Image: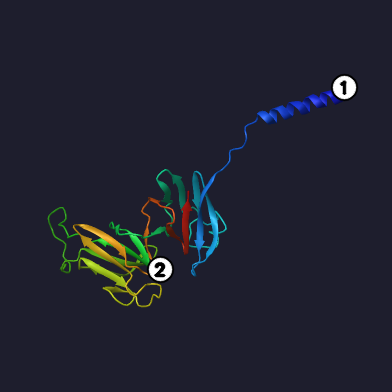
Amino acid sequence: MKAAAGAVVEDALQQAAALAPEPAKVTVRGQLTLIRPDGTEGGSHPLRQGQNLVGRGQGHLFDADPYLSPRHAEFALTEEGLEVRDLRSLNGVFVKLTQEESLESGDCFRIGQELLRFDIINPPSPIEDGTEIIGTPNPGYWGRLSVIVGRDLDGPAFPLFDETVVLGRERGDILFPEDGYVSGTHAQITLREGRVCLTDLGSSNGTFLRVRETRTVPTGSLLLMGQQLFRAAYQ
């Protein structure tokens, strides 16, 4: 009798297991590959269908980088491509330029080890009662490039006067002679018809523009996060 009852229970459990829905499979559609300074690959992190959180503590490729925030960025694969969202990280997400890019006031970019911020210089305007603010006469500067040396701390600033300003280590208008990662002529900023553009000049190590909030990038894009370089690839 007990054996028969046991057989009935086992049969019921098997039927229930057969009817239970299979666990959803998580589809891996891409990966972030770490690129070492010598150009070799140093491992990969999968990009799955849906949201992918990147940050210190979110995977072995990220844990040793103290410049990554715990919740640094979010990656999502969409019909348009790979959407990169900076989660208000301290040090940002930077995308390597492959073509001319528009600059907005407050944008940051990296060349070599230099972290730079671009700001538009607007003509001074009177305060509400009509009094004008006194200051050194502006000879025609339309922008400023500031070196960022820490949180809320700027280093040297370079006023932008000419319509084309070249940045480099050896030749150009703004030089960083001590930075061996900056090419002889590295990048340029151009003012053209009221639009400010940033262009890489075929530098060895590239020019990287900080993601403002969200940006969709094509497969093969190179991203700087913290002190590490990653290549994003997906299907």
Q: Nearer the viewer, residue 50 or 160?
A: 50
Look at the image and tell me whether residue 6 can be seen.
yes
Q: Quadrant of the N terminus?
A: top right
**Is 156 left or right of 4, judged from the image as shown?**
left
**Among all residues in the image, which is located at the extreme right?**
1
Residue 108 horizontal/vertical position (percent): 34, 61
- Disc 2 marks which amino acid? Asn
- Disc 1 marks which amino acid? Met
What kind of element bears circle 2? loop
**Is 70 left or right of 111, judged from the image as shown?**
right
Q: Which residue is mark 1?
A: 1
The residue positioned 50% from the left and 66% from the top of the image is 36
Eyeballing the image, is 38 above or below 54?
A: below
**Is 5 left or right of 162, judged from the image as shown?**
right
- Residue 14 position by quadrant: top right
Q: Nearer the viewer, mark 2 or mark 1?
A: 2
What kind of element bears circle 1? loop
**Among all residues in the image, which is located at the extreme front?**
235
**Among all residues in the image, which is located at the extreme left?**
130
- 10 Å crowding of disc 1: few (<14), some (14-19), many (20+): few
The numbered disc on residue 205 is 2
Q: Nearer the viewer, residue 196 or 213?
A: 196
